[in-house]
Image (cartoon, grey):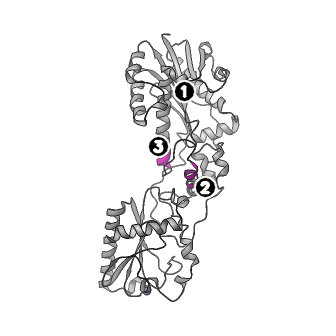
Amino acid sequence: MNCWIGTDEAGKGDYFGGIVIAGVLVDEKSLPALRELGVRDSKKLSDNQIKRISKGIYDACLCSVVEIGIEKYNDLYSKMKNLNHLLAWGHARAIENLLSQQECPLAIADKFGDVSYIENALMKKGKQIKLLQKVRGEEDIAVAAASILAKNKFIENIEKLSAKYNMELPRGASLVDVAARAFIQKYGFQGLGMAAKLHFKTTNALPKEPLTTPDTPVPQSASQPSDKPQDKAQNLQSAGPNTKSVFPPSKQPPVPQPIQQGLEKLWAPWRSEYVKTTAHKSNSCIFCDNKLYIIIQGDKAFAVLNTFPYNAGHIMVTPVRHVANIEELSPAELSEVFTMVQKCVSKIKDKLKPDGFNIGINVGKVGGAGVEGHLHIHIVPRWNGDTNFMPIVANTKVVSQSLEETYNLLKE
Ligand SMILES: [Zn+2]
């Protein structure tokens, strides 16, 4: 063999993200370079190796990468109901993209179904090529190179998708349930098709709508610039330095909008304990009567850990005097309260390394104040993606344990 094409795909077993099919044309000229690069089955390579070797493959060979974005994937799957047809279409496009640039007698693909799937998907130009589907196709260096390119592009796409929806989307299919639930929490069940392969069994076990948010929300941060989940221009594209392919146009499904953009509301189910208890509704004042978890005690102000936190490290700074309104504070009290806020923020930054904060005051019941009579400033540290897993994994017990830890850390 002095010239052959290898094709392979990535992403078909991953719940999140679409799929990528790559083709690499190998000939006498490029073969030594591929051997030099250490091209082998992408499953045996680390992400970094994949990235590095991909660059070398692009330099050495004629390559074609066909991407089917996740939304397009769901759309096509719902019509075709057969993954093999979808894959065959991708393999056929990769092969034809290469054939349009160089004649080649043979193409080898990893075996995923009957060879006729690809044959049927090949157009006129591709009909002359001999097709081979091999079990353990990656043993062929051209197929291995294609598997590396496909995997590399798939990893890039998952990273882009994660950035777009501001949460880390895991690869694979076994440990995706938590992330899928968090995604639904942010974008609704309708939005799941923007990130995940809906026909996977995982989807059936997921809640069909976000869980409701309990009352007294913390003040919301200003929305960050939109990350444009509605920008569908890149839905289906072909990349790779050498070739282009265009899927026949088909109708786009309606695009569900995310429930919110930027930093999301924190969902803190353990706070329901607080909402249910009547202690805070009695005449006693939690700031005047309860001296638990005080981080800093000053003359006119003190900082206390919230025992029903919205997030780890949730601190409240309050004047010592029992006053309800900000305009009742004396200049000395104002100064001490805000100096203490400053101290807390820098302490939290130092010890807990958050990515941002919500800092605010709720005044009066309609303002969301849990303790109406005694003015207090909330300081809630925020981490990128802190709404992802907390709603699922955190519960009262976990938080009360971390409360002790947080207290010791900040008190230090
Ligand atoms: Zn009080």
Question: Mark 3 packing: few (<14 Cα in 10 Å), some, or many (20+)?
Answer: some
Q: Which residues are magenta?
A: 160-182
Q: Position of residue 106 (x, y in %)?
A: 55, 14
Q: Nearer the viewer, residue 246 or 114?
A: 114
- Say which residue label 2 marks: 188
Question: Does residue 26 lie above or below 328 as drawn?
Answer: above
- The Cα–Cα distance between marks 1 and 3, rounded to whole angstroms, is 21 Å
Task: Say whether residue 375 is visible.
Answer: yes
Disc 1 residue: CB within 8 Å of ligand 1: no
Q: Position of residue 288 (x, y in %)?
A: 42, 86
> Disc 1 on helix, strand or loop?
strand
The disc, 1 or 3, on the residue closer to the chain's N-terminal end is 1
The three-letter amino acid code for the residue at tag 3 is: Glu
Q: Quadrant of ligand 1?
A: bottom left
> Disc 2 on helix, strand or loop?
loop
**Circles 1 and 3: CB distance less than 8 Å?**
no
- Say which residue label 3 marks: 159
Q: Position of residue 142 (x, y in %)?
A: 49, 20
Q: Nearer the viewer, residue 77 or 34?
A: 34
Taking the magenta stretch, the answer to whether it contains residue 174 is yes
